[in-house]
Image (cartoon, grey):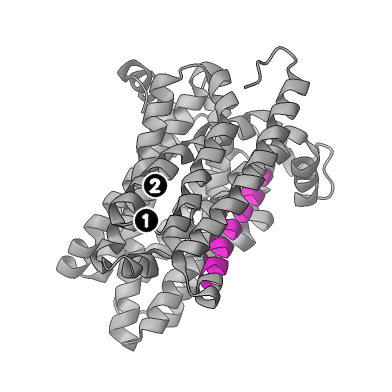
Amino acid sequence: MTSGGTIRALVGNREFRGMWIGSTVSTVGDQLAAVALSLLVFERTQSAAWTALTWSLTLFPPLISGPLLGWVADRFPRRTVMVCCAWLQAVLMALMAVPGVPLWLMVVLLVVVLMIATPFLAAQEASLPTVLPDKRYDDGVALFGTSVDVAQMVGLAAAGFLVIGAGPQVALGINAATFVWVAVLVQVSVRHRPAADPLGSQRDPEGPRGAFTLLVTEPRLRSLMGMRLLAGLAMVPEGLAVPLAASLDAVWAVGLILAIEPAANVLGVAVLFRVVRDPAKRERLIGPLAILSLAPLVMFALDPNLTWTIALLVIAGMAGAYHTPARAAWMRILPDAYRGRAYGIGRAALRSSQGGGMALAGVVAHSIGSVTATIAGAGGIGLLLATQATVAWRRARNRHDPEAVAI
């Protein structure tokens, strides 16, 4: 991802190291818990529908908690928010691990745990620009993002063996322990800092609405958010992975198709940050890479075979690395007092675009009877939107910094 010297410098930062290790370990634990709960639901209900519904519940809490709870990370000291949230999640997850807990209660506890994750993540994300020096911030965001992607893949890969071998309760207990680990790490490694906007005293009596207004009126933030929301179209192949593999007479390749996006993204971030060291140059590549992340999908109109399908998805996934510099630029531009609320709103919008895009793609594919045509259509629409957002980002960036060299 970045050079060895850069990684050593980042890990050498005590505050960053504590949040990074905690986040990575906790992500693995979250995957264990998700698989464990799904297995418990299936064992007790013998219903594929209830199992799928339980898994889908993990997507919805951020849609509510993002706009409603992101403000906590601005109103109170961010280390305090992270520590309190982690302890609450540890207690709730430990309750889920108790044998004999009713299934409905476990589902309720899971939803609450996921709701509490929003202020924690908002406080963590908003802390990074303060914890890291400017020259290391982009690299820190990249290391955080790729570590989470790898941790998700490792966690899901290990979950099946651990849950089957040791039992769902053990997996849930391990996840509870990871939250304790996070709370302790943050407490001992991250410095206490005053709240960025204590009790809303800084010019924002309307709460989240003030942050939303900023996001839609500031041209750079608006164009960056637009490009990030293109993930809803870029992830259409994942949403259609099963019928896509079936159309290729390769049902065995479903797992491979699902794994390509995160794996290719990690590779893309590594290449981008190794080849382009200057953050300003990476910012100028955000638009072109956003376009490239969708262009390969248009080629599905040619009904590619499995080999070409994999190649196209790898190219699209690697180009999706633009999300990392876009995420860093977006948070850097935001005033500190708005970062928690803006993160909550942005997370909810991103989840909505991803879930909505995949759901709509399923409806369209069923209606027209062609998976590849649906993917190609998503790519075509995405190309138009990405081009528009790229032009808007270039204009907004050049207007703010007349010396910026446009591509």
Main secondary structure along the magenta-highlighted residues: helix
Single out the residue that lies furthest toward the left: 165
Single out the residue that lies furthest toward the front: 302
Query: Tag 2: residue type?
Result: Leu
How far from the left and from the top, in percent, is residue 372?
45, 62
Return the residue at label 1.
304
- In this rendering, the answer to whether 128 lies above or below 36 is above
Disc 2/disc 1 C-alpha distance (Å): 9 Å
Q: Is residue 178 magenta?
A: no
Q: Are marks 2 and 1 in contact (CB under 8 Å)?
A: yes
Q: Secondary structure at mark 1?
A: loop
Q: Is residue 374 found left or right of 31 in the rendered image?
A: right
What segment carries the magenta color? 339-362
Return the residue at label 2.
312
- In this rendering, the answer to whether 325 lies above or below 356 is above
In this rendering, which labeled residue sits more in front, label 2 or label 1?
Answer: 1
Residue at position x 40%, y 35% in the image: 268
Could you classify mark 1 by the number of other residues whose Cα lies within 10 Å: few (under 14), some (14-19), or many (20 or more)?
A: some
How far from the left and from the top, in percent, is residue 43?
28, 83
Q: Is residue 349 magenta?
A: yes
Tag count: 2
- Work out whether residue 233 can be spotted: yes
Q: Tell me the quarter of the image containing the N terminus.
A: top left
Q: Tell me the quarter of the image containing the C terminus.
A: top right
How far from the left and from the top, in percent, is residue 56?
47, 70
